[in-house]
Amino acid sequence: MCIHTDGRYVYTSVDMPKLQKDIRVQEILLAAMQEFLEKGYYQTSMESIARRAGVTKGGLYHHFKGKDEILLEANKKFGEPAEPIFSNLAQAAIAVEGLKNFIHDYLTYWAAHRKELYFFSLSMTKTMELPALSNYHAAASEGLIALLQSVYAKGIRQGNLKEHDARSSALALLSALNGSLAYISMNPTLAVDEVIARFRFMFVDALA
């Protein structure tokens, strides 16, 4: 077990080497994200990542084969904090409430994590060049679409949503949410609460 306190790590596990490796990898991924954001993908080097992370270039290559692998792992790592949002949606007893909460939580999370949002936007420019990254995002998107589709279908079964094509609603909602994130990233003054209210009406209330 590792407890993070006041910026320091306190180790309570006997598996110290593994904990130290995990923390080092997290530090490298954070350093890489900062380098990518400041310099762009092509201007970032393994040397600059190693320097910012406080490791040798050899130490960096011990954990990662190159920038492409670092970019892929950083995408996975910095999406992890948002996973409870999807779990809450899947576990919602009342589908329409789950959808409304999901719209709120998804948009407010990314609005509050603009740095991570910028990072993911930067990553999207590399998806056509990196099959592994493209496959990762494709699988993640399809998984979320399938989840949303199942919740819409549940809402229909519960009688809270009218009969309609659940997959079409899932595709439209996810597309609208991710499209709105681009505006959020470009416009810090965008009223997120207004977007949430309108999306709830369009993708939940209007289907009731």
Image (spheres, rainbow, N blue to C red):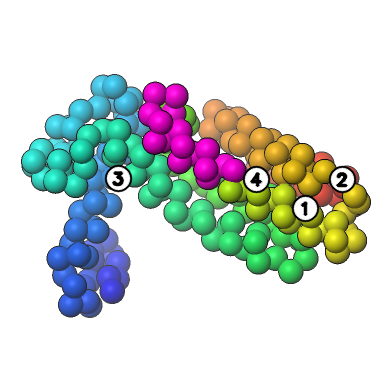
- Which corner quadrant of the image does residue 99 belong to? bottom right
Q: What secondary structure is found at the residue carrying circle 2? A: loop
Q: What secondary structure is found at the residue carrying circle 3? A: helix
Residue 34 at least partly seen: no
Q: Amino acid at mark 3?
A: Leu
Q: Start and end of the magenta stretch? A: 127-142
Local crowd at mark 1 within 10 Å, few (<14), some, or many (≥20)?
many
Left or right of 125 in this view: 197: right
CA distance separating discs 3 and 1:
36 Å
Residue at 44% across, 54% down: 80
On whether residue 138 falls in the magenta region, the answer is yes
Q: What secondary structure is found at the residue carrying circle 4? A: helix
Can you give x and y, in whole percent of width and height, for residue 23 in the image?
Answer: 23, 58
Q: Give the number of the mark in front: 3 or 1.
A: 1
Q: Give the number of the mark in front: 4 or 3.
A: 4
On whether residue 133 falls in the magenta region, the answer is yes
Left or right of 68 in this view: 185: right
**Which labelled disc corresponds to residue 30?**
3
Residue pointed to by mark 4: 145
Q: Amino acid at mark 1?
A: Tyr
Instruction: Name above or below for residue 19 compared with residue 108.
Output: below
Residue pointed to by mark 1: 152
Mark toward the start of the polypeptide (4 vs 3):
3
Q: Amino acid at mark 4?
A: Ile
Can you give x and y, in whole percent of width and height, for residue 26 in the image?
Answer: 27, 52
Residue pointed to by mark 2: 164
Residue 139 at least partly seen: yes
Local crowd at mark 3 within 10 Å, few (<14), some, or many (≥20)?
some
Mark toward the start of the polypeptide (3 vs 2):
3
